[in-house]
Amino acid sequence: NKNFPISICTWGFVNANAKAGESLKNGLNALDAAIAGVAVEEEDIRNTTVGKGGTPDRKGNVTLDACVMDSNGDCGAVLCVENITNVAALAKKVMTDTPHVILAGKGAEEFGYSQGFKKENLLTESSKKALDNWKKTSEYKPIINIENHDTIGMLCMDKNGDIAGACSTSGLAYKMKGRVGDSPIIGSGLFIDNEVGGAVATGLGEEVVKTVGSFLIVELMRQGKTPQEACEEAIKRITSKGDDYKDFQIAYIAMNKAGETGAYCIHKGFAMMKYQDDKNERVEVDYFNKI
Ligand code: SD4
């Protein structure tokens, strides 16, 4: 099938998506390609919303959330992990090497070291300065489209047509200590059903969790909606609740079993990357708030 392989990811993460797309082209399976893709951003300290260099909580701790889901319906997640960069890979280890699906905090970290993950300082000097600056007002307000890149969520379809995904984030800047968002919550930040398709989310995690966004999108696709229609419906579930949506961004991307993709968000400024037919393209995504 000429449509395979395919890789899509949130925001303009060109290199991450190229890494996943090329890995798929070289025959890697969907799950490992997605993990390799998100690792590019986890390791890039210039990206202040994922992995090393991620923005800390208000106490100065960089705490990461990630999950993965495979085409056979297995999944793994790590919540609020410190000192380990490649948390999507760690989430896979939880899936493959423990009897559990989720590990949190110190337990996840210790498990990581036992699996050979390196202990690293994730807090950069510039993040420390930015935190000191933030403390002058301590105003907690999610910023719409942080530097036009944010949490990385990735969906891959490999040469066999199997779909898997990964999601990795440092969460919202200056969150409360211990806060966990949607990104490591299976069904909210990511969901895959290899018979139907997959979806991932980025944006204000609290609102994604309340509507179990990614699971919702996959179920809507199961009922016959295209990925685009399903993403639009999931955004409308949120925007129809009141006017609060004016102050936060949420974006979804989705892929179905036929290799069709879709994406939708609340506010202008979100893009997704799409690798298909050997091309890695940036796709500007349509949005709800047109005024
Ligand atoms: C979270 N969804 O922790 C993530 C972060 C994000 O725009 O995507 N921010 O809520």
Image (cartoon, rainbow, N blue to C red):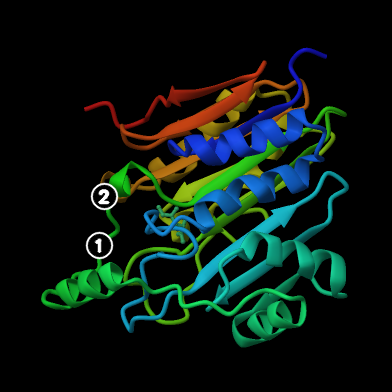
Kindly identify which residue carries mark 2. 247
In front of the other: 209 or 2: 2
- Whether residue 111 sits left or right of residue 230 in the image: it is right
Frontmost of labels 1 and 2 is: 1
Q: Classify the position of ligand 1 by quadrant: top left, top right, bottom left or bottom right.
A: bottom left
Give the residue displayed 39% in from the left and 41% down from the top.
239
Q: Secondary structure at mark 1?
A: loop
Q: Position of residue 237 (x, y in %)?
A: 49, 42
In the rendered image, the vertical position of residue 15 relative to residue 53, given as above or below? above
Q: Residues within 10 Å of mark 1 (few under 14, many from 20)?
A: few
In the rendered image, the vertical position of residue 21 relative to residue 81, given as above or below? above
- Whether residue 264 sits left or right of residue 119 in the image: it is left
Q: Quadrant of the N terminus?
A: top right
Residue type indicated by callout 2: Asp
- Whether residue 251 sits left or right of residue 2 in the image: it is left
Q: What distance separates the C-alpha of mark 1 from that of mark 2?
A: 9 Å
Asked if residue 143 shows in the view, the reply is yes
In front of the other: 171 or 244: 171
Give the residue displayed 66% in from the left and 31% down from the top.
21
In front of the other: 57 or 38: 38
Residue lying furthest left:
136
**N-terminal label among 1 and 2:** 1
Kindly identify which residue carries mark 1. 141
* Image quadrant where residue 186 sits: bottom right
Q: Position of residue 59 (x, y in %)?
A: 33, 84
Specify the label residue 195 is tagged with: none
Asked if residue 222 shows in the view, the reply is no
Give the residue displayed 65% in from the left and 70% down from the top.
78
Residue type indicated by callout 1: Lys
Q: Position of residue 282 (x, y in %)?
A: 46, 25
